[in-house]
Amino acid sequence: SSLFGSFPAAAEDAVFAVTRRFNECPLPGKVSCGVGAYRDSQGRPFVLPSVASARAALAALPAGGWTHEYQPIGGPPAFAEAAQGLAFGPLLAGLAPRLGSVQSLSGTGALHLAVSLYAKFSPVGKVLFSDPTWGNHEAMFEAAGLEASTYRYLDPATPTTPSLDFAGLKEDLLSAPEGALVLLQACAHNPTGVDPSPEQWREIAAVCEERKLVPLLDNAYQGFASGCVETDAFAVRLFAERKIPCFVACSFAKNMGLYGERVGVLHVVAEDGEARDNAVSQLKIVARTTYSNPPSFGGRIVEGVLGDAGRREQWEEDLRGMAGRIVQMRERLRDGLERETGSSWKHITDQIGMFSYTGLTKEQVKACEEKGVFMLASGRVSMAGLNDANVDATAKVMADAIK
Ligand code: PLP
């Protein structure tokens, strides 16, 4: 038999499989709540006005003003500075001497850089992540050869109304081995939409400090969750302020709608300047040996939005618009479900960000799919797939599925 034929076939990615089944579904009025990509109130992909403006400014540059040269391995300094300002805000001046940043292939690439560096040099080689988490986290840890385990996240006593099991979370972090990497989602937890409160974040930071854990903050939704970049930066800035050495993996996929441009950044908050330089030098080795250097187009757009006062203001308005529409859909879905089922669906409006963890079982999800409403098997609904035209029908399909 052939070499390639001897490779075992891998399973299809669960999220992309839902999109494929949605595309194949012949039902009129089908609803796509699988993949986490924002859609406007007509269900169309959305180019943010701030991004369109930055793009137009690039296109208007004279010949030679915009070339296609290689970028530095870690990305251009102007991009790094803009991204640092967004993540750390007023802390930046104090942080700068021990802060390093490497442009990445979106949030996934930022996580890859951090995980690769940790796997290569940590003598501990262990990582903890929330149960549940974004499907790609565990796969990436496994690919890096790390010993992975979970910390508790959702309260098992209330499976149909998902909420945080903070006591369980804290207990598991307290018993984590010193030096272990801990994946923490900075805001808008995927897939649950359940975030710790500011007070709970302070306790988590204290435990990380006490147990000498290495936080990897996955910052994939800054500004997209609440509509305010400062509010959503709370956890990231808390760790930085407490001088806890950590990684911060940022994505511009959601908050600028730059999904396919693959633009993100990994920040390293180190103990001192020398530690920062060591870490960044090694991150560049990881980058050089995997993709060599980052693509330039997305980074230029981000610089154009963050670096121009007018566009930055427009962007914040764009964010409020997207977040506001999602909040509205949460209210509409909750109302619809309460009307159809007669029970409380408060968890839908308590949750935050792109996703809602509905509490539907696998079988109920399957029943929804048969009627053209597509979500993940875990019961995760991407709120962006809902709009005025389909939210009531979606509530009805969900309600029928749980009857
Ligand atoms: N982290 C979380 C929690 C996510 O939900 C996502 C995307 O869905 C990512 C990271 C990475 O996304 P991207 O690589 O498109 O920036």
Image: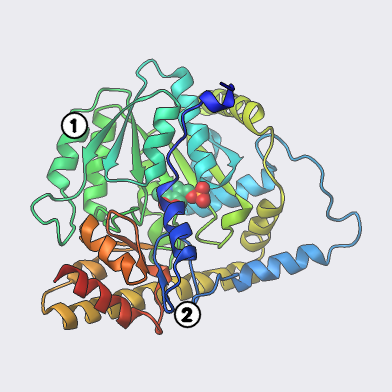
Of pointers 2 and 1, the one earlier in the residue sequence: 2
Q: Residues within 10 Å of mark 2 (few under 14, many from 20)?
A: some
Q: Residue at x 62, y 24 (%)?
A: 285
- Relative to 16, does residue 128 appear above or below in the rendering? above
Q: Position of residue 311 (x, y in %)?
A: 63, 69
User: Looking at the image, which residue sits at the far left?
Assistant: 157
Q: Position of residue 56 (x, y in %)?
A: 75, 69
User: Looking at the image, which residue sits at the far right?
Assistant: 63
What residue is disc 1 on? Answer: 174
What residue is disc 2 on? Answer: 41
Q: Position of residue 215 (x, y in %)?
A: 36, 35
Q: Residue at x 18, y 52 (%)?
A: 164
- Amino acid at pointer 1: Leu
- Amino acid at pointer 2: Ser
Q: Quadrant of residue 217?
A: top left
Helix, strand or loop at label 2? It is loop
- Relative to 285, does residue 16 appear above or below in the rendering? below
Q: Position of residue 189 (x, y in %)?
A: 33, 53
Residue 46 in the figure: left or right of residue 243: right
How far is mark 2 from mark 1, CA to CA?
Answer: 44 Å
User: Looking at the image, which residue sits at the far top?
Assistant: 123
Viewer-side residue, 131 vs 252? 131
**Tag 2–tag 1 contact (CB < 8 Å):** no
Residue 59 in the figure: left or right of residue 40: right
Residue 370 in the figure: left or right of residue 350: right
Viewer-side residue, 342 vs 327? 342
Q: Is residue 388 visible?
A: yes
Looking at the image, what colour scheme do you see?
rainbow
- Relative to 191, does residue 128 appear above or below in the rendering? above
